[in-house]
Image: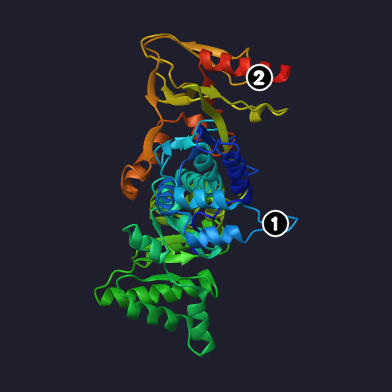
Amino acid sequence: MDPFGILYTDLYQLTMGQVYFRLGLHERPALFEAFYRKNPDYGAHQAGYTVFAGLDPLLSWMEGARFGEEEVAALRALRGRGGQPLFAEDYLRYLKGMGGFSGLTLRALPEGRVAHPQVPLVSAEGPLLQAQLLETALLNRLTYETLVATKASRVREAAGEAVVLEFGLRRAPAKGGEAATRASLIGGADRSSAVSLSHLLGLPSSGTHAHSLVQAFLALGYSEEEAFQAFAEVFPDDTILLLDTVDTLGSGLPHAIRVFERLRRRGHRPVGVRIDSGDLAYLAIQVARELDRAGFPEVLIVLSGDLDELVIWQIKSQILEEAPRYGVDAERLLKRLVYGVGTKMVVSWGHPALGGVYKLVAVRENGAWAPAMKISDSLEKVLNPGHKKAYRVYDKRGLATADLLAAFDEAVREDEALTLRHPTDPAKRRTLRPGEFTLEPLLEEVYRGRRLFPPLPLEVLQERRRRDVERLDPGVRRLVNPHLYHVSLTERLFALKGELAARMERG
């Protein structure tokens, strides 16, 4: 049995399914929405948006997930507290006959696009039992990749035009390393050190060498320079040397320069050096100065070692301030930097879990959608009910000014005034006149019993992210204390939400 197959779920999805089955509700059309409640807060800094990732792996999983003999046997073996079978035979027969998710239709935000709290990432419509069973696998795939893609996007924002390499496979959560690599590349990393996934995505993998190479040579009685020379002999056109095993400036750099000079005499062009510890900005300045003096102004300087978006921003700020006093052109130095980012990107350091939820928003009753509602003492957890659609609202500058939720059958037009209501505060609203805004529908159908399109090239997803981020207000893109991006309701949806909340409070 595949441990990552259809039983890659929580038990309560299956026990609820048996309740639906016993009461004849299992094939009742239902509508669930997956969304998240808050943008990541990393403590000293916050995200003003997320980057949606994980959709393609979810769709591929759905196509292959089935209740077969082994899955049914595993469920048959489960017992309740009294020792009786937890699942009835007729229910198990139904699951086996159902197979997988052939009855579901999914609408989703295209992967790689910018997302915001409360706005559906995925809408799942179909038989109540099938839609319920999707929850765990959906959230497992979407929330983690979205977190990592968001972190990678922020790293990309901090790095600017510099190359960003993903080095995080060894620190990622087991098989989640593949998801982390994929999400990092969607979010803005240029290359990855992960060999297998890079190959599957059609990218060359990237890397240098570890301290252990130099350590091994030293332990065997050789020198650091001999270790560098050995690497250069094997990879004369791909030589990147790690400088800080012994002493970055006193040993690693002069040894690397001597090896580079030999390569140059043989007609090869050294690629770069890497610094993995110490004051990275100061060391980069000193290394750049010495490389320039030795006639290697094009050699790249790879920085690594617990980097994230704020550390990169601080490195760049320090270089801009300090490089001139050492006679180094700061702008030219910044252009030759490469950032190797690992742990803090692939674990979304500071915010390791996205508050993703998957909520029932409507059930089909007498040929119409009956909205489902959940109220809470916490305003952010009060559900936006009913069958909905989502729009992105752009202002006259062409920048995104709000995401708007509307009833699914509601007409929202650009040639009519549009009132945006705050989801919970009746006093907060704004009205946009025709000509002041444009609308873009956000969700598209991606699955109807099967996926509706093949996996898209990585470049398409990267371009979506780049385009969406560029259309955010600069305040929302800010790495620290970003502006709040507005998510609003139409007048009709706001009224429905208030009506249902009042009805539930009356009992």
Which residue reaches farthest front? 90
Nearer the camera: disc 1 or disc 2: 1
Answer above or below: position of 433 versus 362.
above
Indicate the position of residue 228 as horizontal and vertical percent values: 42, 78
| Dot 1 amino acid type | Gln
The answer to whether residue 464 is visible is yes
From the viewer's perspective, tell me whether residue 63 is left or right of residue 47. left
Residue that extends furthest to the right in the rendered view of this protein: 82
Q: Nearer the viewer, residue 507 or 436?
A: 507
- Residue underneath mark 2: 501
The amino acid marked with disc number 2 is: Ala
Q: Is residue 444 left or right of residue 137?
A: left
- Tell me if I can see residue 297 in this picture: no
* Picture coordinates of residue 290, whole percent (x, y): 43, 65
Say which of 4 and 7 sits in front.
7
Foreground of the two, 365 or 251: 365
Q: Which quadrant does the C terminus fall into?
A: top right
Do the residues under discs 1 and 2 have CB atoms within 8 angstroms? no
Compared to 333, does 44 lie above or below?
above
**Pointer 1 residue:** 84
The Cα atoms of the two marked residues, 1 and 2, are separated by 40 Å
- Identify the image's colour scheme: rainbow, by chain, secondary structure or one colour: rainbow
Q: Which of 326 and 411 lies nearest the eye of the viewer?
A: 411
Q: Earlier in the sequence, mark 1 or mark 2?
A: 1
**Circle 2: element type:** helix
Give me the residue at 47% from left, 50% from top.
324
Q: Residue 199: which quarter of the image?
A: bottom left
Q: Residue furthest left?
A: 267
Badge 2: residue crowd in 10 Å (few <14, some 14–19, many ≥20): some
Q: Residue at x 46, y 70 (%)?
A: 242
